[in-house]
Amino acid sequence: MTIGSHLKEFHGLPAFTFPGVDDPTPDVSSFPSPESVAWRVAVNSYESEEQWEAAFARFLEAVDTKRVRALVVGAWSDVYDSPPDEVIEALVAARDRLPALRGLFVADVVMEEAEMSWITQGDMGPLLEAFPDLEEFGVRGGNQLVFPAVRHERLRKLTVETGGMPAEAVRGVAASDLPALTDLDLWLGTSEYGGDADTADLEPFFAGTRLPALTRLALRNSEIQDAICAALASAPVVARLTELDVSMGVLTDDGATALLTGQPLTHLKKLDLHHNYLSPDVSARLLETLEPAGVEVNTDKEDADADEDDDGEVWRFVAVGE
């Protein structure tokens, strides 16, 4: 699986791409109302004739940004090689011009621009500090990603999509005080692409003490999916969740059985295990145990096919690595 298309919506709004410098000069009067879309600002990732900051400056002049509710940062020049330091600086400098901003996504970059694990990232801390009224924040790419521990009073949804999330960034999220957060979605990835977190780094999420409002927890796209499920089997946070997502990773019968034999899951509305390596028997047990209680269970294997070497070694893969 690769990410082949840009976000079609964000923060509950349809995405609208602000015209590039090479596009025909737009008729500003034809733009959608500022608050009705998630504005995507991007430049070519290869040999761009315009830097992202210049495109953003054009956006600030053309749109009534005081009414903008959601902003999507697309590719910046040489996104596969250059961190978004200037992008972050430009956003922070414009904070007073974006008083209504409630949703921000950094690096809506698809495979033709750079594979997810090629995206060079930066420090997300300044953005969360500059926009204290954000309700949703997302970031794609784990290479050089920095996520320091922060306190943010209003953030309700946090998404980090990576093929390998650095353990230090995982620990930063885990140490953050996010009292309003209801939805946490972390793509942990693989060690091959820098995903070196283990279950000890995830313990604050299992306890849930810094996330008192959490109702949806997604710890997915991980090569340690079985260990995660074993920890979730007795994790205090599970009792107050409505949705649990352990999809897209290397989930086998061991992890699924740990969930089934652990604390009850019948209170959940949704349990997502899609892209898995479950046997038909264990998959059937999940459905037979939980669906009668009203739990929506997704056990679709999708394209999770294991490979076996001549010597018998079995290789399993997360949904999104590179």
Image (cartoon, rainbow, N blue to C red):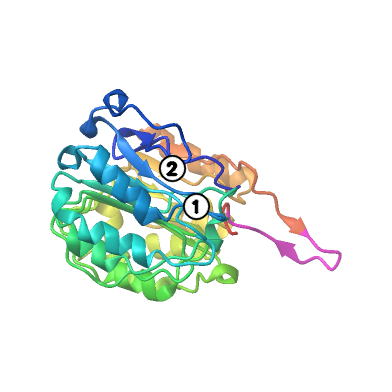
The kind of residue tagged 2 is Val
Q: Nearer the viewer, residue 107 or 60?
A: 60
Q: Is residue 20 left or right of residue 276?
A: left
Marks 1 and 2, how far apart at CA: 8 Å
Please name the residue shown 40% across and 65% down the image: 231
In this picture, is 171 found above or below 78?
Answer: below
Q: Is residue 165 magenta?
A: no
Residue in view at x 27 percent, y 53 percent: 239
Across and down, in percent, residue 155 comes to 20, 53
- Quickly name the residue at label 1: 49
Q: Is residue 31 left or right of residue 257?
A: left
The answer to whether the residue labelled 1 contacts the one labelled 2, judged by CB atoms less than 8 Å apart, is: yes
Type of the residue with mark 1: Glu
Residue drawn at the location 56% of the way across and 42% of the way down: 4
Q: Earlier in the sequence, mark 1 or mark 2?
A: 2
In the rendered image, residue 264, in percent from the top left (x then y), is placed at 34, 50
Name the residue beneath numbered marker 2: 21
Residue at point 81%, 65% (across, down): 312
Magenta segment = 308-318
Could you classify mark 2 by the number of other residues whose Cα lies within 10 Å: few (under 14), some (14-19), or many (20 or more)?
Answer: some
- Establish if 1 lies above or below 142: above
Prevalent SS, magenta region: loop
Which one is in front, 172 or 16? 16
Whole-percent x and y of residue 194? 52, 71
Residues packed near mark 1 inside 10 Å, few (<14), some (14 to 19) or many (20 plus): few
Q: Quadrant of residue 147?
A: bottom left
Residue that extends furthest to the front in the rendered view of this protein: 25
